Image: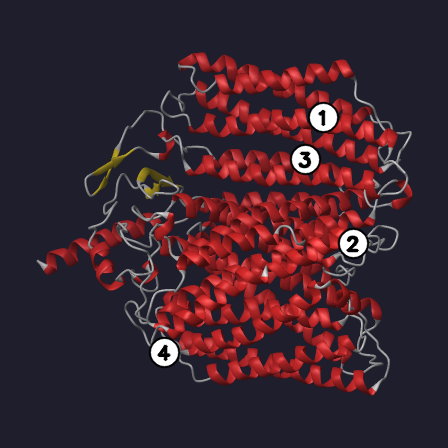
Amino acid sequence: MTQTRGGQSLRLHRQLSAIWGTGPGFARLAAVNHSVIGKRFMATAAIFFAIGGLLGMLIRTQLASSESPFMEEGLYAQVFTMHGTIMMFLFAIPMLEGLAIYLLPKLLGARDLAFPRLTAYGYWCYLFGGTMLLAALAFGVAPDSGWFMYTPLSSRVFSPGINADVWLLGITFVEISALSAAVEILVSILKLRAPGMSLARMPIFGWYMLVTAGMMVVGFPPLILGSILLELERAFDLPFFDPARGGDPLLWQHLFWLFGHPEVYIIFLPAAGAISTFLPVFAGRPLAGYRAVVVALIAMGFLSLGLWVHHMYLVGIPHLALSFFSAASALVAIPTAVQIFAWLATLSHGRPRFSLPMLYFFGFLFIFVIGGLTGVMVAMVPFDIQAHDSHFVVAHLHYVLVGGFVFPVLGAAYYWVPHMTGRMPVNHLAKPAFWMIFVGFNVTFFIMHLTGLRGMPRRAHLYPAEPGLEWFNFISSVGSFVMAIGFGLLLLDFALHFRFGRAFRRNPWQARTLEWAMPTPPPPYAFASLPHVEVRADTLHPDRIGAELAAGQGYLGFVREGRMETLAVEAIGGRVEQVVELPRPSYLPLFTALATGVFFMAMLFKVYVVAALAPLLVVALFLRWTVGRGRRSDSGPEDVGRGVSVPSHFESRSAPSIWAMMFALIADATLFASLVFGGLFLWISAPGWPTPVMPQPDGIATLAMLAVAGLGCLSAWRSIPSGGAGRLAPLAFTVILHAGTMIFFAWSAAAIADPTEHAAAATVFFALCYAALHAAIGLVFAGYGLWRAATGWVSSVRLLDLRIGLLFHLYAFAAAAITLAFWWLMATLGGTGIPA
């Protein structure tokens, strides 16, 4: 009996591996598997971390003495700008994305993420965007205005070369990866869980990533908008940030920090989620206060989005507003403290094993608490006025980010790298490496609190030769070299791990989560069959469950027509809802990312004809993704095992792609709302308002377009319930309405005499272009839906393509109406100004 079961398991393993596996050689470029892409993200981020660390060592070498000739001012500006940019954009966020991409399907009991090709596309965008930034550094034209790119320093007047353009375009390229990962993570967590795994039973890491991805969806669009506006100002002279023509440099700070402050928590929360996952394993008991931690996470997510002025106390904001943001900045310490006390309670009620990941946990706790305390200090307005732009702030930043991210990630690495390799750590150099990193870090950055309090400014490559500054800086630089040696030992320890680590079969830590219920290294399909979860997913028995799943005793414990299948569930309750058929490996994500890169490179080198044509190629390639996806006949409910039958996601009203479109539109709406905020901010704050050059909307044309928007929504809606050929007419009418909308807004934008004359005209011009672009995209969706319906890919049951399009049609026509209202509002306000 055992031999028969073993033979069945082996046969199932071979069948699934043939379907889910990635080919050798150049076929690896077509990989879409989450394990492959997640490891690529993490490995690439680690390389960027090493480069960023090297740049940090160059900074400390320059600052070791007061009049160091090591670097001249311009080179120093490039080095410190790239150090911050790499650490924030190319290391921290991609590392957490890679960790989530690798772990989430395994923790949630799925075979892959919801959109494997989107994940691969995001990785290539990240790699190409990061390479673009590093190439600029190698050729001496790296960004040199700081990792925050404050205007007017980054404007064309003060940064005439391509240095600032490299940052604006390269970071926007990388942010495509971040947003695609955020949508992927949100949908996968909400839909691709094991049957029975309600949100209340989900492993805590899933909650951390759910909140983090939600913050990314609404936190990144303001930065993307700011980068677009600043690049338009630099390339085409649209004066969004020029105070001489109705703009305001402070608009950039608002848009940047609307992203920048949530980013701190976007970086911290996944690392804290890793701690909340491995700490209970070594404590020998489940996480204490699970529900309290979940509530704290949600509270932290909401609070973090309202703290951006925390970084702008000295720009002239009214005192009442300062008091609000100061109180909110201090308030965010409460949900952080809830998590810390939950960890301490878990330890105190368990029987801790002090393995190496726990060493990094205690290192994190010490450093992060200091960073949190100094964070409360700089949240207080009087103290921040004294410490602003000094080395005290630099020290606080590193205590929060290194303590709150790097130390937990290193602990997580020692916990999960055995899962990736199938080998246990050697640990010969691990403890010396930890102590050198820990001691070197504190020597480096604790002293920077003192130099900051003595008045040493940040971003300065020279400083007065005062004993209190020079000796402190020298000691700080020595500490940085000690820390660097520690990271070198760490790298060598991982090399020994890969070469000499002892092999094991399954679950060496005696963990209670699903990722350990599979062989290690994990097979490409993750689970031979999918589990049914009836208890909280961090209290399972992976050894028993793993044997059952390998024998095909769970859901989908078979192969059907060579399909890559996993299950989707209800978002909250976890009831099985649909079978999701995933796409095979493909080179299309790579080709699409290359085409996207052509656009950014053409913009960088000002080849605007190519930049105008490249998006057409990108759209064509995305459409190519859809060829062969779907079914030409209704299939009805399909057997998924355990006596359950559910429809395919092509026939579901709640398919993952519908959720993805909703989250993508939330990000899009956040960008549009940021534009509206920017226009109103300029009216209130910028000089040169009111303006006589404000373009006025035509009343009759406006009413006509509002009618078109209403008809468009109705027509798109009517295409769903119509049967057979009856839906072709509403779709064709939607195509015509989108075309008319696009022409109207494009004509209106072209009719603005000179959008470079004043920021009011430039803002309206951008809003009109935004509406025209969305009408053009809506035209593509409507045309695609018309083609799919005409060629038999759509029926009264198979409506997925049309439901996705419907969401965008409704948004595009609503955006058109809001754009008209915004135009009218700006024309009214621009002509009156703010009362004196």
Q: Which residue is mark 1?
A: 821
Residue 621 sits above or below residue 487 on the image: above
Quick one: SS at disc 1? Answer: helix
Q: Residue at x 71, y 64 (%)?
A: 380
Query: Is the N terminus in the top left, top right, bottom left or bottom right quadrant?
Result: bottom left
Answer left or right for 194 relative to 84. Answer: left
Q: Amino acid at mark 2?
A: His
Viewer-side residue, 407 vs 346:
346
Query: Is the C terminus in the top left, top right, bottom left or bottom right quadrant?
Result: top right
Marks counted in the figure total 4
Q: Quadrant of residue 793?
A: top left
Mark sitting on residue 353: 4
| Residue 695, position as x, y percentages in the image | 84, 26
> Is the residue under label 1 in contact with that under label 4 (CB below 8 Å)?
no
Mark sitting on residue 613: 3
The local crowd at label 4, few if under 14, some if 14 to 19, many if 20 or more residues have their Cα within 10 Å, is: some
Q: Which residue is mark 2?
A: 319
Q: Residue at x 82, y 40 (%)?
A: 684
| Residue 293, position as x, y percentages in the image | 45, 59
> Is the residue under label 3 in contact with that under label 2 (CB below 8 Å)?
no
